[in-house]
Image (tube, helix red, strand yellow):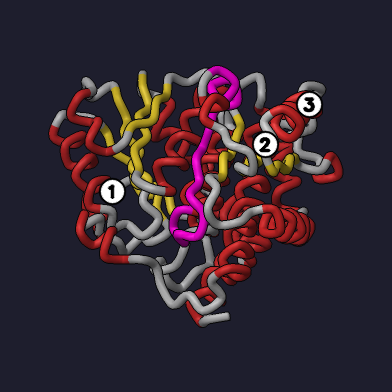
């Protein structure tokens, strides 16, 4: 395996400690940055867009008015002093997110940057910084720990606010600080199962809904980054209505849920017996003690990160770097 793939693996493994480190580092005083506002807008690109989607679920679940946008969409959305815009950028260098923060500030909105690099360019756009503790040295590999620590940060902020889920969220966060090793071991086991299932050629559908659809989105990005398998994030009900019509024998699917639900067995039977797909069901073990879908999303993300990694190790063990000409053409950093 190459030095590049070794580095990608390490930023997955480090989540054993980094999620707990981030949860324990959050300043409860930061909740005042959002409680006085009528609306919360989260923006981010790539993995950080998925984190923004996760933030939407987190804040809406506790009764706050929150939406997520891709950075260019800021231009089409009304902003003023009653709005707070949270720009999510792990490295603090995403050009589109920087632009969105500038536009939001010019319209009078308060801005916050959720980042892993307090010295990044995004910190110049606001004095309000929420800083994660991903414990990575470089952002030039496939993002793993910076993604889940940003999710954990948002979940911790929500747990500090009085709401009907507060006790459950606080208990889940305590569990997340305790089960780091178990979570990584389980995710690695699931990742190896996924890598045995997945083959190059047929598309890979990651099917989920609710907060766990964020895991599907991140899984899609992880597989697409390495250009071995083309991944698609599919909403569970949407897949039933139209996406199944284009399925061919041998296409691949991962059903992702927080916990095992009564309908999951039937859904899997349709995937495997009716659509003739190669399919696997990912769901969080009850032994983890995570009660909310919001918390269950985090280990599912790690399992998909592991799945994409072991798939690359199986089919492209000599991979030295991403197919960067595509990204450079768009000047994302």
Q: Position of residue 124 (x, y in %)?
A: 22, 54
**74 w.r.t. 113: above or below:** above
Label 3 crowd bin: few (<14), some (14–19), many (20+), radius 10 Å: few
Q: Which mark is residue 261?
A: 3
Q: Secondary structure at mark 2?
A: strand
Q: Residue furthest left?
A: 106
Residue 240 highlighted magenta (yes or no): yes
Q: Identify the image quadrant of the C terminus.
A: bottom left
For marks 1 and 2, give the CA distance: 41 Å
Q: Position of residue 173 (x, y in %)?
A: 68, 43
Q: Identify the image quadrant of the N terminus.
A: bottom right
Find disc 2 in the rendering and name its residue: 255
Label 1 crowd bin: few (<14), some (14–19), many (20+), radius 10 Å: few
Give the residues in magenta.
Answer: 224-241
Q: Secondary structure at mark 1?
A: loop
Please give the name of the residue rendered at 63% of the width and 56% of the height, measured from the top-left corner. Answer: 307
Q: Is residue 167 visible?
A: no
Q: Which mark is residue 235?
A: none
For marks 2 and 3, give the CA distance: 11 Å
| Circles 1 and 2: CB atoms closer than 8 Å | no
239 sits to left or right of 65: right
Please give the name of the residue rendered at 49% of the width and 57% of the height, measured from the top-left corner. Answer: 146
Q: Position of residue 104 (x, y in %)?
A: 21, 34
Q: Earlier in the sequence, mark 1 or mark 2?
A: 1
Please give the name of the residue rendered at 63% of the width and 39% of the height, measured from the top-left corner. Answer: 249
Q: Earlier in the sequence, mark 3 or mark 1?
A: 1
Residue toward you, 104 or 138: 138
- Point out the frontmost of discs 2 and 3: 2
**82 w.r.t. 24: above or below:** above
Please give the name of the residue rendered at 70% of the width and 41% of the height, measured from the top-left corner. Answer: 279
Find disc 1 in the rendering and name its residue: 127
265 sits to left or right of 36: right
């Amino acid at each position: 395996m190459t030095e590049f793939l070794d580095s990608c693996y390490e930023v997955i493994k480090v989540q054993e400690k980094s999620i707990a480190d981030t949860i324990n580092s959050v300043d409860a005083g930061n909740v005042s940055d959002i409680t006085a506002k009528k609306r919360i807008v989260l923006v981010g690109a790539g993995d950080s867009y998925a984190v923004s989607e996760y933030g939407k679920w987190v804040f809406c679940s506790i009764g706050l008015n929150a939406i997520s946008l891709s950075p260019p969409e800021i231009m089409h959305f009304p902003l003023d002093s009653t709005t707070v815009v949270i720009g999510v950028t792990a490295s603090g260098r995403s050009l589109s997110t920087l632009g969105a923060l500038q536009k939001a500030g010019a319209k009078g909105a308060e801005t916050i940057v959720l980042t892993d690099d307090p010295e990044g360019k995004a910190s110049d756009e606001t004095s309000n910084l929420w800083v994660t503790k991903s414990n990575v040295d470089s952002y030039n590999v496939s993002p793993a720990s910076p993604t889940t620590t940003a999710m954990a940060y948002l979940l911790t902020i929500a747990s500090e606010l009085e709401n009907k889920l507060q006790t459950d969220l606080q208990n889940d966060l305590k569990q997340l600080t305790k089960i780091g090793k178990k979570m990584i071991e389980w995710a690695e086991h699931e990742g190896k199962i996924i890598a045995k299932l997945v083959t190059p050629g047929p598309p890979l559908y990651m099917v989920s809904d609710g907060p766990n659809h964020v895991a599907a989105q991140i899984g899609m990005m992880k597989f697409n980054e390495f250009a071995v398998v083309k991944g698609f994030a599919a909403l569970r009900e949407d897949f039933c209505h139209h996406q199944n019509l284009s399925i061919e024998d041998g296409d691949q699917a991962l059903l992702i849920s927080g916990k095992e639900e009564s309908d999951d067995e039937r859904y899997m039977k349709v995937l495997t017996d009716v659509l003739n797909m190669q399919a696997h069901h990912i769901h969080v073990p009850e032994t983890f003690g995570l009660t909310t879908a919001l918390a269950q999303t985090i280990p599912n993300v790690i399992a998909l990160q592991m799945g994409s990694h072991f798939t690359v190790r199986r089919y492209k063990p000599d991979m030295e770097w991403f197919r960067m000409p595509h990204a450079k053409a768009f000047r994302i950093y």
